[in-house]
Amino acid sequence: MNRIQFVFQKSLIFMMLGVLVVTTGMNTALASPTVKTEWSFPVQIGYEEVAKVARLPLSPDTMLIDSRPYEGRYVHGYIPTAVSLPDSAFEKKAKDILPENKQARLIFYCQGPDCVLSHSSAHRAQKMGYLNVAVYTGGLPDWEASGGIPALGVEGLKGILEKNEQYILVDSRPANKFAEGSIPTAISIPDSKFNERKGMLPADKGVRLIFFCGGYDCILSHQSADKARALGYTNIAIAEAGYPGWTKIYGSGAAVGQAKPADTSGAYPVIEFEKALATGQPAIMVIDVRNPAEFATGSMPGAVNITVEELEKKLPNLPLDKPVVFVCTTGSRSGEAYYMAMDILPASKNFFYLEASIKFLGKGKYQISPNSK
C-alpha cells in the first residue's frame, strides 16, 4: 500500500467515525427519556407512542393515566385525554377508574424521568392483573417539549381568568351554542369557520390561546388548537371539560349579547329517533356530521357521513322524501348542520337534529342522553 492509499483509507475511516458520532448524538437528542433504577417500571415508551392515543376519538382499549396530584398538577396542565388517578389515591380509586378489561393498554405518566409516581402506579396496576402496562417516562414535560399541546382543567382555567393574565379564550362550538351561553371572556370562533375568522386571533404568536367546546367527547377544540399551531401560535392549551365542565362547577354563563333563547324546534325527539332506528328500515335518514376518523370508530346503522364543512356542497343532492336527522357527539355540530341546512333550503320541513350527547360504541351500538336545557 503506498502513502496516498494509506492516507485516503485513514481519512475515510475518520469520516465514517464522524458520521457515526453525529448520528448517535442525534438519536440520543431525539430519544424520549428512560430510567433504570430499583423503582422504575420495565416497560417505558416515548412521545411518538403516546401521541397516537392522546387524541379523539378515544381508543376503547387504551387509557392514558396521570399519576400526579389532581389539584396541584393535573388541573393546571395534563396530556389530552388522560384521566386523573393520583398515585397517592391509587388503592382507593383504581377499581372505579381503571377498565374491567385486564388486556387493556394502560399508560401511566407523571412529571418526568425523576418522578416515581407513574412507575409506582404501573407496578400496582400490574399486581392487579393488568397485562399491558407501560410508563411514559418523559411525562408532561417531554410532551410539551416535543410539541404536544397540553390540556387544562376548568379549575386551572378559572385561575387564569382570575389572575387576569394575557390570554384569548376561544369557544370552538357553533355560534348558536355560544349564543346560549359560554365561559366568561370567551370569543366565538366556530371550528367550522376557523379559516374565515382566524383574523380574530392576536398578531402576537406567543399569546396564550385556550380552546374549548362541548366536553370531553367534543373534538372541535382539538381541531381548532391544531389549526392555531399550524398558524405558528406557540402557547396553546385545550380546556377539555369545555362548557359542560365549567357549568357543572361554576354554573351557567349568561347568554351572549341580545341572543334569543335557543330555538329547539328542529330537535328531533330522542324517543321517536330510537323507535325509528329500531325498525331496521327507518323512516328517517341519519347524517353523521362528525369527521371521518370519528365516523370510522362506529355510528348508527345506515348513517351517512357528511361533515359540516361538506354539507353545503352535498345538501342539494340529498333525497328529502323523509326526515333528515343530523347527529354528532354532543349536539353542537348537528345543531350547526341543521341551521346551515335551513339557510340553504329554507322551505324544507324535513331537516332535524338530535339535541343529545351520544356515545358511539362501535358495531352499530350507541347510547343517547338527551341534553338538558
Image: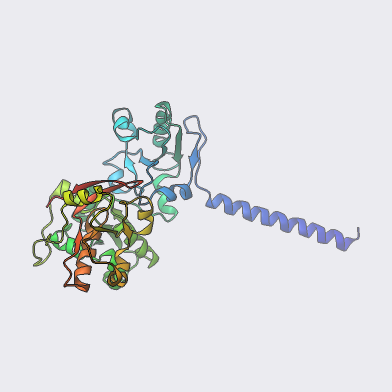
State whether residue 159 appears in this view: no
Q: Nearer the viewer, residue 340 or 318?
A: 318
Is 4 left or right of 170, judged from the image as shown?
Answer: right
Q: Position of residue 46 (x, y in %)?
A: 48, 46
Q: Position of residue 84 (x, y in %)?
A: 31, 40
Is 208 left or right of 110, judged from the image as shown?
Answer: left
Which residue is drawn at the image coordinates 68% and 56% (left, top)?
Answer: 18
Residue that extends furthest to the top in the rendered view of this protein: 127
Q: Nearer the viewer, residue 306 or 17?
A: 306
Q: Nearer the viewer, residue 314 or 135?
A: 314
Q: Position of residue 319 (x, y in %)?
A: 27, 67
Q: Quadrant of the N terminus?
A: bottom right
Q: How is the image coloured?
A: rainbow
Q: Position of residue 318 (x, y in %)?
A: 29, 68
Q: Total marks drawn?
A: 0
State whether residue 140 appears in this view: yes
Q: Nearer the viewer, residue 283 or 88?
A: 283
196 above or below 156? Answer: below
Which residue is drawn at the image coordinates 34% and 39% (left, top)?
Answer: 68
